[in-house]
Amino acid sequence: LLENTPTSNAVAFRVFRVIKLARVIRIVRALRLFRGLRVLVHACCSFLPSLSWSMALLSLCMLSGGLLMGNLLQDFINDESQELEHRLWIWEHYGTAYRAIYTMYEMTFAGNWPIYARPVIENVSHVFVLFFISYITFIVFAVI
């Protein structure tokens, strides 16, 4: 095709250089299309540290609230003078550390906190309204 002369080699190199330049231009044009994606990825990388600290704080609050509620409700669960149906409901939601923490997780993120607060307030003691009002106000509404 091309002979082995210096002029033909120079022309061949120029042709290859132009083809390579055209390929680079296509890649740059394609990268311009993804500018929004780059901005989004950069934003995600920027907010991940603060999101991690927020989740750590929320986890600590849910853990503390769950363990507190579980311990405070143990006397009611063990009290045989109370109705069995109420005791079973309290045990299913606050009876173990795992159940109490999961209930606090659902109260915090699902928004169905009245379902878990009202039976405790009505069947156990009205004093628990102080805990639920402070937890919902400061953790669910303020932190989230």
Image (tube, rainbow, N blue to C red):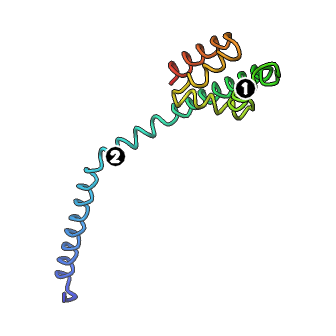
Q: Vertical placement of 28 versus 77: above or below?
A: below
Left/right placement of residue 143 relative to residue 77 reads left
**Disc sitting over residue 37 in the figure:** 2
Q: Nearer the viewer, mark 2 or mark 1?
A: 1
Mark number, residue 67: 1
Q: Quadrant of residue 23?
A: bottom left
Q: Nearer the viewer, residue 3 or 28?
A: 28
Q: Position of residue 53 (x, y in %)?
A: 57, 30
Q: Is residue 10 left or right of residue 121?
A: left
Residue 112: image location, x then y, percent: 53, 27
Q: Amino acid at mark 1?
A: Leu
Report, in whole angstroms, how far the alpha carbon at label 2 lies from the one at label 1: 43 Å
Residue 49, compared with residue 65, is above or below; it is: below
Residue 3 percent location from the top left of the image: 19, 89
Q: Secondary structure at mark 1?
A: helix
Label 2 packing within 10 angstroms: few (<14), some (14-19), many (20+) = few
Element class at badge 2: helix
Q: Measured from the top left, where is residue 94 in percent x and y?
A: 70, 28
- Residue shown at the point (77%, 20%) measured from the top left: 82
Q: Residue at x 26, y 50 (%)?
A: 33
84, above or below 10, in the image: above
